[in-house]
Amino acid sequence: MRGLDGLMTTRHVESKDGTRLAVYEEGNPDGPTVVLVHGWPDSHALWDGVVPLLAGKFRIIRYDNRGAGSSASPKPASAYTMANFADDFAAVVAELSPGQPVHVLAHDWGSAGMWEYVGRPGAVEQVASFTSLSGPSADHFSRFVRDGMKRPYRPKLFSHAVSQAAHLSYMAGFSVPVLAPALMRAGAPLLRPMLTRGIPANRVHHGQTFVTDAANGLKIYRANFFRSLTRPRSDRYIEVPVQVIVNLDDPYVRPYVYDDTHRWVPRLWRRDIRAGHWSPFSHPQVLATAVTELVEHLEGGAPSRALLRAEVGRPRKPFGDMLVSVTGAGSGIGRETALAFAREGADVVVSDIDEAGVKQTAARIAAHGGVAHTHVLDVSDAEAVERFADEVCTTYGVPDIVVNNAGIGVAGAFLDTPPEQFDRVLDVNLGGVVNGCRAFARRMVERGSGGHIVNVASMAAYAPLQSLNAYCTSKAAVYMFSDCLRAELDAAGIGLTTICPGIIDTNIVSTTQMHAPDGKRATVPGRRAQLEKMFALRRYGPNKVADAILTAVKKNKPIRPVTPEAYLLYGTSRVLPQALRSTARGKVL
């Protein structure tokens, strides 16, 4: 791997105690300097997937920690304290970036060593920002565990402290001299695939010295584990701007360990991602983006939406600094949903096949101080939806929430419905949802920082009605499609909610195509008028569906019926499905 000029230079730097460190430099020599620090049992190769994503903008410095890669390996365990790791970093930046503050991304024990360094007086003059990954401050960590265990009368705090201590109990075994290193040398080849299970092999980057590094690195545990538990400092306040990336699925460092980090760090950003301990392998693009956004902001650029959301202590509305895309936003449920998200602080991309309607929605959002971007879109056109998604993501960024709402109605028995009308309902109601998910879900997964998708179905999804054959079929398909996709997207931290409204007072009745047998076609206008009157008297407006959508997203609800009758039919479909099938045999129109 190489930087912009295709070269990676290697040199050696001597640390405070005389340990020789192998240092590697690459990337853009004219850009801000980013230092990458690895942990156990890795070498500088840990960052091989991240460097290409940063090298175009930044000068990259990384080095092998003492005991790893091509750096020297002091024999006594006492040479592997976090103070020594901090001294190593100080020696590297003094040699390669004298007088110029650097930005740091550090992982595991490398991150713990950086916490030691940034807690020192004057660190802010040498470190412009510190992004910490799966390696909390030893002092902050020990305070969290000790303080929690002292408070059994606070069950949540106490259980979190006990749980976190248990998740790191293996460190005691790693601290045993002689035996632990011998076992590690024998078992390291088996350990490697276990550590990175579930990550594609082409994303895993270990150095050629992995076995030796894993054994030598156990001295880190011997030098720090018991020391950090018994002698934590209570004055570890950090002046350096810190960004914490929390791997929610990390089996070693649990997310709640960072819940009180703001006590020690006045300028703190926190990003939670659905990843395990080795996110430099599984989510290199997320780490590169997080570092880039923080550096560019601290260098004078405007903060991104994601960075604004990550800033701890910054007041914002529930959906503030988010981007939401809503289809079918020209009227009804789509319009009210767009308005509701805008009121809660989101920027909204509103689209509809009705240009006048979508402009009216955007105007109402703007009138209340919100931000709306309008697009004319036929969701049944897969190519158009793909172009739409590409334009949205390029211009405004990948949406955090996507609401696939656009839909149409058609009434009539199957044999009375013209084939082209039946197909059109499937194309819009099902195809529009599939097209929206295909276009945006892939981009959300690639972004790697989660999100949420809302697919609007109907109580007709689980209530068979011969008078709504095409409509029920399309919504039932949306329901099942969403169930399947929800399971698929869960690993990427993307939630999916299926909304199932009941009788809602919108314009759907007036716009629905109604079909009847030859002898009953004259009754259609009267029947339409009856239905419009019934919907109006129901007085259950689309704003209530919008409120349900926002609540479901906040709580990550998988299925959300809306209206009492929708809940009733949902329960009936589960308990007495035959009752609904029997009811469906009634008259059509």
Image (cartoon, rainbow, N blue to C red):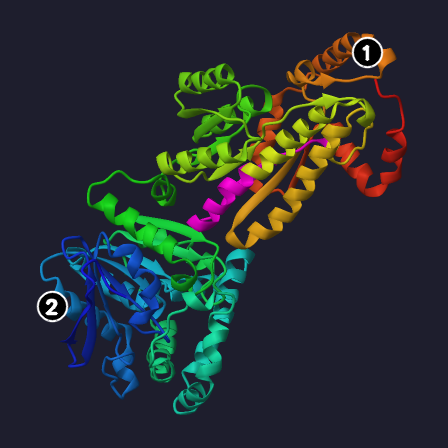
Query: Pointer 2: residues within 10 angstroms few (<14), some, or many (20+)?
Result: few
Query: Please, is residue 214 above or below residue 467 in the view?
Result: below
- Badge 1 marks a residue whose secondary structure is helix
Tell me where residue 167 appears, x and y as whole percent.
Answer: 50, 69
**Residue 169 in view in this figure:** no
User: Where is the C terminus found, in terms of image quarters?
Assistant: top right
Tell me where residue 410 appears, x and y as whole percent.
Answer: 72, 22
- Badge 2 marks a residue whose secondary structure is helix
**Residue 276 in view in this figure:** yes
Instruction: Tell whether 390 sits left or right of 574.
Output: left
Q: Which residue was labeled with disc 2?
A: 95
User: Where is the N terminus found, in terms of image quarters?
Assistant: bottom left
Q: Distance of mark 2 from mark 1, alpha carbons?
A: 87 Å
Query: Pointer 1: residues within 10 angstroms few (<14), some, or many (20+)?
Result: few
Q: Residue at x 37, y 43 (%)?
A: 306
Instruction: Tell whether 225 sits left or right of 469.
Output: left
Along the line of sight, the residue nearer the viewer: 411 or 485: 411
Q: Which residue was labeled with disc 1?
A: 521
User: If you read the primary sequence from the N terminus, does the residue marked by circle 2 or circle 1 appear first?
Assistant: 2
Q: Quadrant of residue 571?
A: top right
Magenta residue span: 436-459
Q: Quadrant of residue 382?
A: top right
Instruction: Tell whether 574 sits left or right of 216.
Output: right
Q: Residue at x 43, y 61 (%)?
A: 282
Q: Residue at x 35, y 55 (%)?
A: 287
Which kind of residue does numbered mark 2 sit on?
Answer: Glu
Residue 511, numbered label: none
Along the line of sight, the residue nearer the viewer: 132 or 401: 401
Which kind of residue does numbered mark 1 sit on?
Answer: Arg
**Residue extending furthest toward the front:** 419
Q: Are marks 2 and 1 in contact (CB under 8 Å)?
A: no
